[in-house]
Amino acid sequence: MSELRAQLREWREVVEKRLPRWWSRALPGALIVIGIFLPFLFSSSSGFMNATIIAIAYAVMSLGLNIVVGFAGLLDLGYVAFYALGAYSLGWLGSGFFFKAQVHVLVSPVASTLPGVHLNFILILIGAALICAAAGAVIGLPTLRLRGDYIAIVTLAFGEIIGVLAVNGQSVPVGGGMTLTAGNLGISAVDAPYFPGIGSFNLLNLRPWYWLIFAILLVVLFVNLRLRDSRLGRAWIALREDEVAAVSMGIPLVRTKLLAYSIGAAFGGMSGAFFGAYYTTVNAGQFQFGFSIFILAMVIIGGLGSIWGAVVGGLALGYINNYLIPDVLNNLPAKFGFNFQLTQVEFGIFGFLLVIMMVLRPQGLIPERRRRLELTAEIAPADAQLAEAPGTPGGGT
Amino acid sequence: MSSTEAPLPAPPAVALSVLRAEHVTKQFGGLVAVNDVSFDIPQHSIVSLIGPNGAGKTTLFNMLTGLYRPTQGRILLGERDITRARPDVITSYGVARTFQNIRLFGAMTAVENVMIGHHTQMRAGLFGSIFRPPWVRREELQTRERARELLAYVGLREPAFDRLASQLPYGDQRRVEIARALASQPALLLLDEPTAGMNPQESQALTEFMRAMRDDLKLTILLIEHDMKVVMGVSERVTVLDYGKKIAEGEPTQVRADPGVIEAYLGKQAS
């Protein structure tokens, strides 16, 4: 088995050496071009298009959470909070919900006649990112002195607080008879994204939605890649590896950690705002704890700390959740004579997938480069001697 | 920055003593780990801190680098009071350290580890990192280049530069840790048992290297060490701690003859 792997690695190295230099840049370029033209292969309102849009939005969230959990090593179990805040940013800034206000900035002719706050979708995205970045810093503050599991508990509580706030916000007055949220009723008359020259988006033609979320994905992906190979990205990884050593080398703990929370939250918020518009409602019932775990599962299945892993993990779980299970395989049990549908057991399926992944490929689908190095490189000579010495526990430092 | 000279420019000249601790005490609950210790580190010297296990040497180190805050007392770096400063701030003032049990970032390469040491020397922030203007690109390249120079300076061989720190042999890990500390361009370098786990030849080589570092980089070095051969060979001054108290201080020969020190190390009968 290991011989086979070594052989495969050797072949890959040989192939990689013969490819021209531009090859490593050509692959992402080709993927982007394919991504742009993909919608033309499917009918504009098909279930597959719908699933693709949702899957890409998941990938954006997964990229955001990957910064917090994968890069900085801060286990965040309350990421749904930023989905909620992002969606509410849309509800607040792009609907008639605050009916006493009259604010219109670059919106469709229809929306500009309605009462309420109506901003262009790009402005809402920026607003959602800023609101969530601020909230991310707030959630980060109490966790600064904590480590490991304790961080997870605090973030989990924060996620729950936002969920409860979303439900009870309908009783929180903000003046003029208006409330903070609409609770389980939902803020329903949200504006569809509108761009001059393109018009308002609608659910009969999903292609503009696809291009919009694809563009968001590219932006978030670009920021992720740049941050990973930067002074800040290295500081995050140093903090993840050894906090004491990192601060002793001059890395400011508070600022570096809060930046991780804020940037991760901002991406969650952008995706949340998109979801709010796409589902045409912002409903307190959407923001369940299970969603935090769902996003975390994408990061872990993709490969903790790996950017491309987060994208693949998000897409994979998105397609499984929204296409494979409900559209393709839903009636499979019936064919075998069982009296249930696959959608009824989807959590069981996800759990099973996670277990299978952890057994067969714990490092994730596309492991982080560092982790791959750790797993494949040969053992250092000194450690090898230690490992051979009888009675040496562990073998190495 | 020219790459032909020594990898680091001279640190700015400060007052005659680089670091001064005044009546420093650290209590953990009822335990007094460091008890009313005062000492000076003259500029451009190598000072050793010795004492039996549990004497409070590493606790003192942790206070000097800001990881612990003294219960009482003051710590001055040159003219500057750093008693309550954060560790990363103290590092930016020019104090760098290594750890007793090596604490490298295992999932980063040797070069990346040293680049973390350069963190305080770099300016790229969030937006600089994202948009990567030309000056950030240049800074990144220069930092990488200087990290490689430093690794070469501490004697790491080229093939090890891009290997993960956790996969380097023990001696190389010690080297990388020293290079990482040097990367922050310190005026004062704190080494916590650098020869632990080394054989006599390696210890001897490190002793010579410490002197070379001091002269090349105009450093002041504070050393915690158990190997008396190293202590006596390299240090100009020795401070002895026992049960958190300073029991002796002075030149190596004086300290070696001090009855209190002999008692602390060998017990009462021997003295």
Image (cartoon, coloured by chain):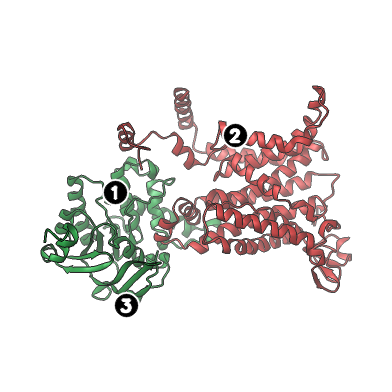
Chain colours: A red, B green
Q: Quadrant of residue A43?
A: top right
Q: CB under 8 Å between callouts 1 and 3?
A: no
Up/down of A39 relative to A259, above or below: above
Distance from disc 1 to disc 3, alpha carbons, whole Å, reads 34 Å
Nearer the camera: disc 1 or disc 3: 3
Q: Residue at 79% of width from left, 50% of height from top?
A: A278
Q: Quadrant of the C terminus of chain B?
A: bottom left
Q: Are marks 1 and 3 in one subunit?
A: yes
Residue designated by label 3: B79
Residue designated by label 2: A357
Question: Which chain contains the residue that carries disc 1?
Answer: B
Residue most extreme to the front: B269
Query: Looking at the image, which is closer to me, B161 or A17?
Result: B161
Question: Which chain contains the residue that carries disc 3?
Answer: B
Please, what secondary structure does the residue beneath circle 3 have?
Answer: loop
Distance from disc 2 to disc 3, alpha carbons, whole Å, reads 58 Å
Please, what secondary structure does the residue beneath circle 2 have?
Answer: helix
Residue designated by label 1: B152
Q: CB under 8 Å between callouts 2 and 1?
A: no
Query: Looking at the image, which is closer to me, A37 or B69?
Result: B69
Report the side of B240 relative to A290 (left or right).
left
Q: Position of residue A255 (x, y in %)?
A: 52, 63
Nearer the camera: disc 2 or disc 1: 2
Q: Quadrant of the N terminus of chain B?
A: bottom left
Please, what secondary structure does the residue beneath circle 1 have?
Answer: helix
For badge 2, the amino acid type reads Met
Q: Residues within 10 Å of mark 1 (few under 14, many from 20)?
A: some
Q: Residue at 75% of width from left, 45% of height from top?
A: A210
Mark earlier in primary sequence (1, 3): 3
Q: Residue at 12% of width from left, 62% of height from top?
A: B256
For badge 3, the amino acid type reads Glu
Q: Is any part of residue B77 visible from this angle? A: no
